[in-house]
Image: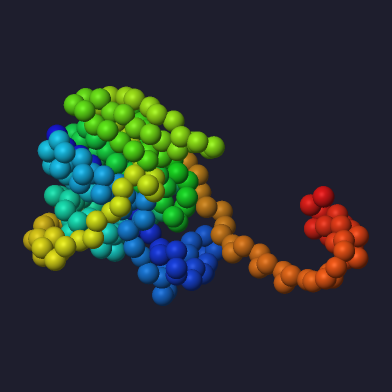
């Protein structure tokens, strides 16, 4: 059985982000890019699934040449093969999903893992869109997973609690923190990864349905004020909350 995992190459959240000169993208100067943290969980789950049921794993990413660094890390962790859908253009979530779905069909993967979201655009929908395009069942925000033959049982996070769902293959699963603890790449894994070839392909033609009109940084927070240190400050505090902050 083929097990696929789709990953994003994203800016490190510790990096200082500046808006590019076009006002619609970020300035990459000085920005460190990493494997999307939620996708590391997806990689680990793909590896665990192979260890349990056998099969072959493939990691897929849509991006430019720099995305190979993320693919190399997945290979070093133990993924068997890698495919780069090479394209440096901006794509919205649906365009990304269409390109990934085409490659997943080519790979004939029956289990597909995604991180629940990427930490750059935070749309949290690419996995579900891909499942719909493939006609696969879908489980999102999984925090536990059991695979028994064709049957899948998962616990997923919902607001205020968790729910247990059951489905069958083929399936797309988006992963959440708590599902597993991603392994570190071993020295052997790193050396083996150097021998593996990253296959480059031309993705499905770009067709965006949304566009980025502009980007801007959040407004800086105003400095705090100390109104008083005893109960006598309460009336003034209430007035400011009502008239200035307008929160009551």
Image spot of residue 154 (x, y percent):
34, 32
Count of labels in the image? 0
Residue, x 40% and y 29% (percent of image)? Answer: 164
Please indicate whether residue 58 sits to the left or right of residue 42 in the image: left
Residue 92 seen in the figure: yes
Residue drawn at (47%, 52%) of the image: 121
Q: Nearer the viewer, residue 91 or 172?
A: 172
Judge by depth and name the residue closer to the eye, 30 or 182. Answer: 182
Residue 157 x %, y %: 45, 38
The residue at the far front in this view is 230
The residue located at (83%, 57%) in the rendering is 241
Looking at the image, residue 98 sits to the left or right of residue 51; the answer is right
Is residue 115 or residue 49 the one in the foreground?
49
Displayed quadrant of residue 105 = top left
Residue 90 percent location from the top left of the image: 41, 53
79 is higher (above) or lower (below) than 143: below
In the rendered image, the vertical position of residue 158 relative to residue 199, given as above or below: above
Q: Residue 132: in sight, yes or no?
A: no
Q: From this view, report whether residue 31 is shown above or below residue 167.
A: below
Q: Quadrant of residue 93?
A: top left
Residue 244 lies in quadrant: bottom right
Q: How is the image coloured?
A: rainbow
Quarter of the rendering occupied by the N terminus: top left
Name the residue at the bottom extreme.
30
- The structure residue drawn at horizontal position 31% and vertical position 29%, both measured from the top left corner, is 153
């Amino acid at each position: 059985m083929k097990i696929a995992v789709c990953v994003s190459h994203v800016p490190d959240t510790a990096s200082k982000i500046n808006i590019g000169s076009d006002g619609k993208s970020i300035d990459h100067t000085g920005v460190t890019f990493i494997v999307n943290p939620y996708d590391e969980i997806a990689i680990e789950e793909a590896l665990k699934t192979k260890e349990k049921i056998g099969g072959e794993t493939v990691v897929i990413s849509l991006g430019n040449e720099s995305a190979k660094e993320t693919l190399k890390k997945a290979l070093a962790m133990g993924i068997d093969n890698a495919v780069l859908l090479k394209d440096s253009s901006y794509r919205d979530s649906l365009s990304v999903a269409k390109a990934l779905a085409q490659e997943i069909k080519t790979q004939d993967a029956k289990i597909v893992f995604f991180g629940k979201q990427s930490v750059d655009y935070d749309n949290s929908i690419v996995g579900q869109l891909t499942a719909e395009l493939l006609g696969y069942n879908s489980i999102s925000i999984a925090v536990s997973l059991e695979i028994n033959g064709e049957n899948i049982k998962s616990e997923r996070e919902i607001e205020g609690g968790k729910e247990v769902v059951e489905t069958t293959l083929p399936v797309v699963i988006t992963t959440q923190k708590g599902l597993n603890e991603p392994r570190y790449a071993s020295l052997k894994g790193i050396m083996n990864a150097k021998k593996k070839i990253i296959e480059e392909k031309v993705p499905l033609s770009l067709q965006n349905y949304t566009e980025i009109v502009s980007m801007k940084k959040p407004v800086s927070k105003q400095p705090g004020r100390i109104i008083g240190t005893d109960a006598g400050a309460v009336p003034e505090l209430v007035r400011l909350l009502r008239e200035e902050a307008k929160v009551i």
